[in-house]
Amino acid sequence: MTDQNKDALTIRNLTLDYGERRVVYDANFALKPQELGCLLGPSGCGKSTLLRAIAGFQSLTSGEIRLDGDLLSNQSFSVPAERRGVGMMFQDIALFPHLTVDQNIGFGLVGWPELKAQERIRELLDLIGLYNLGARYPHELSGGQQQRVALARSMSPKPKLLLLDEPFSGLDTELRERLASEVRTILKSDGICSLLVTHDQREAFDFADRIAVMNDGHICQVDTPFNLYHEPTSPFVAHFVGPGEMVGAKVDGPRSVMSPLGVLTNDTDLGFETGSDVKIFLRPDDLIHNDDSDYTAILVDKYFRGAHHLYEVRLDNGIVLGCFAPSHHDHEIGERIGVSLDIEHLVVFPR
Amino acid sequence: MFSYFRILRPNGLLIATFGAALCVALPLCVVLSFIVTTSSDVWQHLVDTLLLRYISNTLLLSLYVAIGVACIGVPTAWIIAFYRFPGRNTLSWLLLLPMAYPAYILAYTYTGVLEYAGPILTWMRSVDMPDWVMSPFLHIRSLTGAALMLSLVLYPYVYLLARAAFLQQSANLMEAGYTLGQSRFSVFRRIVIPMARPAVAAGVLLAVMETVADFGTVQFFGVQTFTTGIMRTYYGFGDTPGAAQLSSVLLGFVAVLIILERNSRNRIKYYSDQMRRLDQAAQHLTGFPAFGVQVLCAFPILFGFLIPTILLVNWTIFDATMQSLWRLAWNSLALAGGSSLFIVGIALLIGYANRLFPSRSLSYVTTFIGLGYALPGIVVAIGVLIPFGAFDVWVSAQLAPWSIKPQLWISGTLVAVIFAYLVRFLAVANGNVVSGLSRLRPSIDQSGRLLGLSQTRVLTSIHIPLMRGSVLTAILVCFVDILKELPATLILRPFDFNTLAVRAYELAGQERLIDASPASLCIVLVGLIPVILLNRSIGKL
């Protein structure tokens, strides 16, 4: 019981069915108080169903969900959604169109003393930066403003846990990126433990302290954004959280592999038997463009990303890899350019 | 093909559209012009004696019908939208059937079965039923009775709009309510009900518009409202200006109703258009609760359709003398068929004008034409009769030098009748045509042209196949509306020209209710067709 007291949200051996179909298999996941978590995965991976189970809109096949140590639901018991103390921000925003901003935010505050409710609404309006728009109706607000009102509304009764179901997916790219970090700041300043569901890896990285990557109903890895990117534990996670290429290699020592790029050495033991065939995963930032390097490759494709270039280069042995280059190093396709390796940690998978 | 290009010439199309608008405007302007003319003695007499009664009866009737349609329409819509039970799908469209009945036919039918010598009261007397049980049946011919008849046939407006509003609410909104700590009851009270309110209001207002325009029911039940007052002033006192002045007061009522209804419609727009439909949140019922809601939904179908239809069929087969039914049916068919073809033709011209030469003034004109449907038939009739009569007088005066006898050149002919239909039903045809045309996006025309089709081929191979359904619907809906129409036909028809509706009205007026049943049954059976079509077009909901 001791570890449960430390975690705000605990999900244990959770299995969920949607009709006949199993959508979540044996999921385990926990969030600490004030932590911002994220369920990241492609569409149809079961992440939204998992979220709805936490909110109380989906019954459990097996396993259990606890909040602050109290049982919320298992296969035979379920606290009704309205008594869970769990707030939720919906994908379609779901603001009440017949109520003003003030009334929307105050919707969950029935039973609060009038003065305290007014104070809470004002406080939240300040927090989302819309303090003078309280009398407006939802259709009179821009998409980004509606989003922030929806956030304020879900925060207003001070839920123990806030769920966010792809809340930014309906917005355009620029607004989406700004809001993800804005919402993070707001939630951090209010200290609400939150769980975001998204299929967008950048949104997840902008928002979360810790991310659970899901695929086909399984939680593949739970880690910090940094570790997910640099130390993925499965090829799926490696590919899903950012670009990179798999290259065949052979283990030739406890910390080194023989690869088409030469012998590569890891900072820790690899845990593979010497002589076994493996794959190594190389991200574009493992290979950097360097005009002074003796090692060269042919530029086959390039994508300008503003602050930098993403090059695709073909090595002499025919292998194609991604490679980052500074923005002002603008080479022509077909040119031979110098590259050098910059690998601290090897990502190795069995073949 | 040649003619197609001629139709496309801007002037022809635009002239047709503005001409149609003038037709709609004519009776309106004529009636309203009498507000400013000096009042006749009869009008003064009306103001002193009857006007107050007309106003209070019309208002009271509207109030009762508003309550009645809301009490039937909202709970049934609620049950169909929020619960799943055996028979739910069937009941959901059976609930539309009473729409096939004009209220006056329902009134004739119930009076026929409930009158003193009728089967029900005869049986009640034979078992010595106490008076207080029998008296409501005896007093079917009253304002309350009229409200009941009107409610039974008009509640589908509320049912349809409320059902759509309930179904279109996002399930996420309800779930948002739950995650904010609200109970199921509180979510219904604070979210579902307020959000459906504009749709219910729009439905009730439509029903009230039909109520103030109703003539057949109130006339038969002897309730003195505006429409019967207009008829009485016109026929009884022979006072056309007085009838026109009464008409303009009635138009004032209608204008208020139109404004309120538009207002509600605008709010509905904000309230729908959400993502996940409520459908997934519906509750399954079995056993006794399922039986309970089945019975509740069956009530309005039973009294609004099933019982009267059984009575009509029964009387038609066994009791009625079917005098000249074929002749009546042919008159109705030819008149309604010809008129609806003409009206839909005009609607097509207006539709294409809007499409080819879109402009702000044109869209205003089209909106204005839409108001024609809100004009009570009797007001249209008075508004047509006055200028047409004046025209006849003028023509006769011109022809007098050649010693041609004065006669009713147009006012006593079918031209006047069809003109009145055009004013009243062009809006109906227009609505269907516009919805058909809106499916023909300009990019469809353009891609047809880019694929090498001529303008004419675009019309024949793209527009006509795509438009066929909505044009047929337009013709059919017009046809049925004309078939049911009573007051305008009654006033404007040529001498001795009878239709099914007029004959049913006349026979009922002579208390030959049983003999009225074959004509009534024809109207109801034909009236079923658009109801079934309507059900099919909203079936996806």
Image: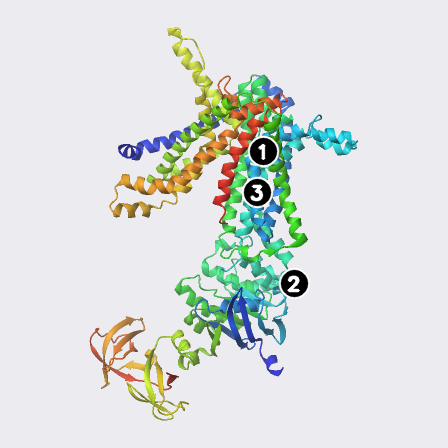
| Vertical arrangement, residue B366 with respect to residue B173, above or below | above
For residue B458, above or below residue A18: above
Q: Secondary structure at mark 1?
A: helix
Between circles 2 and 1, the one closer to the viewer is 1
Image check: A172 left or right of B484? left
The answer to whether the residue labelled 2 contacts the one labelled 1, judged by CB atoms less than 8 Å apart, is: no
Q: Secondary structure at mark 2?
A: loop
Q: Amino acid at mark 2?
A: Trp
Evaluate whether residue B33 shows in this view: no
Q: Alpha-carbon neighbours of circle 3 within 10 Å: few (<14), some, or many (≥20)?
A: many
- Give the left or right position of residue A87, taking residue B451 as reference: right
For disc 1, the neighbor class at 10 Å (few under 14, some 14 to 19, many from 20) is many
- Decide: is B74 above or below B362: below
The dot on residue B94 is 3
Measured in 3D between alpha carbons, the distance from the residue under mark 2 to the one under mark 1, in whole angstroms, is: 47 Å
In-image side of B342 versus B177 (left or right): left
Quadrant of the frame with the N terminus of chain B: top left
Task: Confirm whether circles 2 and 1 share one chain.
Answer: no
Numbered badge on residue A112: 2
- How far apart in space, not on screen, are marks 3 and 1 (Cα)? 23 Å
**Chain identifier of the residue bearing label 3 in the image:** B
Q: Which residue is mark 1?
A: B211
Q: Amino acid at mark 1?
A: Thr
Q: Residue furthest left?
A: A335
